[in-house]
Structures are given as C-alpha cells and as structure tokens.
Amino acid sequence: MTAGLNSETILIRGSRIIDPARNVDAVGDVLIRGGSIASAGGLVPPDAVPSGSLVMEAEGLVTSPGFIDIHCHLREPGFEYKETIATGAAAAARGGFTTICCMPNTEPAIDNAAVVEYIRHRAAAEAVVRVLPIGCVSKSRHGKELADMEELAAAGVVAFSDDGDPVYDDNLMRLALTYSRDLGLPISNHCQEPSLSRHGVMAEGWTATRLGLPGIPAAAEETMIARDISLAELSGGKLHVAHLSTAGSVALIRGAKERGIPVTAEVCPHHLTINDRWALGDHGNGDVSGAASYDTSTKVYPPLRQDRDVEALIEGLVSGVIDCVATDHAPHDVASKEVTYQDAAFGISVLETALGSLMGLVHAGRFTLPTLIERLTAAPARVLGADYLPLATLGPGTSADVVVFDPSRQWTVDTSQFLSKGKNTPLEGTVLTGAVVCTIAGGQVAYQDPTGAVSRSNSNPQDR
Ligand code: NCD
C-alpha cells in the first residue's frame, strides 16, 4: 500500500470514464467512499468531499475498472528469487491490474487446499491487489492423476490448469472437463502437443531456419485445441484456451463457438504486438545488424509467431472470437535468461508493459479504447464466471477497483524501474504510449506514478 495515501474518500475529477460493463463512455467524476464506488459519472458536488480526502485532477486521463489478468505467474512458493506474491502484485498495480489469477506451476504446485490457503494468506498479508489462485488439473502437474479438484474448488481456486505444460492425456482432460462442468469452473489449457513441439525454442519458419534454432510448428498448438474442443463438446465442461498464438487457432475457436461449444480463449499482449523476427533483432525497422539477435527475452511459450498470425489474433480479439487479453506474466531471474537461446527459460515479464503495448494498437486504429478496456475487464471476469462481474465495473456499490491512465503519455521501458523481479522483456528501451497514473484496489491506492497526481485536499475542493 502506498504509505500515507489512503483515505475514506477519493475523488477522481474530470476524466473520461470508460466502463464497458455499463456501456459508459463519458467525461465526469468518480467518487470512492469506504472502499466502494459511490458514483461514477456526472459531477460530484463539493460538499460530498470532506476536507482531507484524496483528490485527483484527472482531465485528459481515462478512468476505468481495474484490469483483470486471468493468467500470470507469481512464482511463490518455491521460486521467490524470480518473483513473490508481493512483488508480482506491486507490478500488477503498476500495470493497472487490480485482480490477478496466479498459475499453479509453483513448488509445491497448487494441487491441494493447504497451498491454496498459503497463497491466500500471503496475498492478504502482502499483496496490494486481489490475488486469485488457479489450481492444478493433475497432481504435482505431472499429468498422470487428477488433483482433488473438489477440494481445490472448496478452498477457493477460480480455475484449473497445468500451465507451463499441457494436460497431455486425452482421458485425463476429458475427466477434468467433466469436473469443470459440475464445479462450474474453467479449465485453462496450455495447448501444445509435445511430440510436435518437443525440442522447439521458437516458431517454426524462416527466422528459426535463419538462426539455426529448432522450431515449434503452429500445428503443435492447433492439434491440441482441436482435441480440447471435441472433449468440451463431449463433456459440456468449461474449456478456456490459454495464450492463443496462431491464425489456425483463431479459426478453430471461431468454429467451436459457431457450433455452440462452451469455449473461451485469451491472447497475450506480446502475441498481438511483436513477431518472431524480434528473435533475429528485427524490431520492425529492418535492422538485422545482429546486435540484438538471439535475444533470449523473446523466448516464450507459445512462441512469437509470424505477421499473419498477429493479424488474425488482432482480428479475433476485435470480433470477440478471442474473449480477452491475459498477460501470461512469466518473470525469470537473470541466470535463467543470460544463457544460450536453447538453454534459456521460456517467458516474458509483461504486467508493467501490457497497457503501453496494447495502447499502440489503439493509437494505430486497430481497435477502440472501449474495446480494449472491455477485453481487459468485463471479458476476463466473464471467463471466470458471473460472480466476478462486480470486479469489472464502476457500478455504484461495487468494490473500488479502479485504474486511471494517460492514454497519450510516452515512456521508455526501463526494466531497472520495474517493480517485478522479472526484467525479462524484449521491450527494454522501447518507447510506449499510454501509462498508468494511479491504481486503486478495494479503495486503497495500490500504485501512483512519480508525478504524484493524487493529493490530499487541505480544504473543501470547492475552494480550490
Ligand atoms: C511460463 C512460465 O515461465 O511459467 N512460461 C512461458 O513462456 N509462458 C509457463 C508457460 O506457459 O509455459
């Protein structure tokens, strides 16, 4: 929590309020009282804001529900040298996220109620945003035997996944989807057929060949998505496809939705904005001098793909075939990345650059700001289920989970400023447009940028 910057009453004055769940896009004031939204829209009368309240003059800024990330890696317990619940939550707040769902590839894995309890306890003590755990599909994520999904659900997990690995076994996935139907919780599968992807470290194609690196074909992802769609149809379970990366995957999800099969899907900021040529050092300006080639921070599951995939993913997100954005924030320590491309760990640290990268697409006219915000708020809440919709709106009486951001502010990515322990991003040194100014979670200031836009009113704002 930002010391000294909390108050019973917070007023965000004069921003563009975008609340897709209520179809609101208008300039007005947002008033927060006692941790809840008192009003969002219109003008707040000065006598509603007692002296000593926090006031933010937010003209030219955008206020929306805090973002919801249904896929991130917080590394605790077991890999605290990469990230902790506290540092991951702080990074999330800096990125504008107020609810984050953490994947169970920890050590021990989140495959029983005691680990869920541990995470909830640590989050309550240390996290500045809401942390919702995702439980394993299989015991220890070994893919052999189902975890006790009922126990995990009772302990409070919001979904199931063996992320980092797929649920390999067809029958185990069928069983898991059957439990998912009965428990009403989604299975988020990392779709990647291992016999096709086994030694691959980047997308199969021209760039991989040029670099002499083994490739992962698009079919590795698509064959498993096709299998999962069949199993979702068979079982009626809630299938959620994690980090979609290929044009063929978008077509599969579109087909399944047209047939009424219960499937949802997410896409990550990096798959929407950069391609496999970044591994060659080509950041879109044609410079392949070699200095930035074999940059291990471009190594990620699923791999960065080609332009036609990026285009299909953008179109899929705009049309709603892909439900939402999720970061797949995968922080790693330096030692896991400062090795050869083949030996490096897979993963990108994303929470703090997500908004800036995605705003690039808004500024390029690829989608509107309200659409982007919908895909970061109401849409991921819908994937989790109706109970989570109140976390994705500024409706009066809901928890004050709010982000205020400047859609036009340019900033240079400097990982030494990251609150995440993971400095592993290919965007280091890149100029992004769109920056979080303040994040409020449950009515508490969880992050405020160095401009200090939030200040305490010494007097009635009427006099200011
Ligand atoms: C993830 C990680 O590091 O936990 N890495 C990644 O590249 N996305 C796990 C995973 O999804 O493979």
Image (tube, helix red, strand yellow):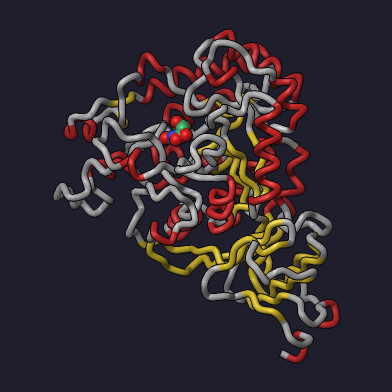
Residue at image position (63%, 60%) is 446
Q: Is residue 321 visible?
A: no
State which quarter of the image contains the C terminus. bottom right
Q: Is residue 40 visible?
A: yes
Q: Say which of 212 and 155 sits in front.
A: 155
Answer above or below: position of 1 versus 273.
below
Q: Say which of 114 and 296 sits in front.
A: 114
- Quarter of the figure with residue 19: bottom right
State which quarter of the image contains the N terminus. bottom right
Q: Position of residue 369 (x, y in %)?
A: 56, 57
All told, the count of numbered labels is 0
Answer above or below: position of 156 versus 368.
above
Residue at image position (33%, 24%) is 217
Say left or right for 138 vs 330. Answer: right
Q: Position of residue 196 (x, y in %)?
A: 35, 17
Residue at image position (49%, 37%) is 79
Answer above or below: position of 292 versus 404.
above
Q: Position of residue 365 (x, y in %)?
A: 46, 56
In the picture as drawn, the residue positioned furthest to the bottom comes out as 463
Q: Say which of 81 and 177 sits in front.
A: 81
Answer above or below: position of 196 versus 418.
above
- Quarter of the figure with residue 386: top right
In the picture as drawn, the residue positioned furthest to the top comes out as 171
Q: Regarding ligand 1, which quadrant of the image does it lie in?
A: top left
Q: Position of residue 323 (x, y in %)?
A: 59, 38
Say left or right for 460 vs 306. Answer: right
Residue at image position (26%, 35%) is 341
Say left or right for 4 vs 244. Answer: right
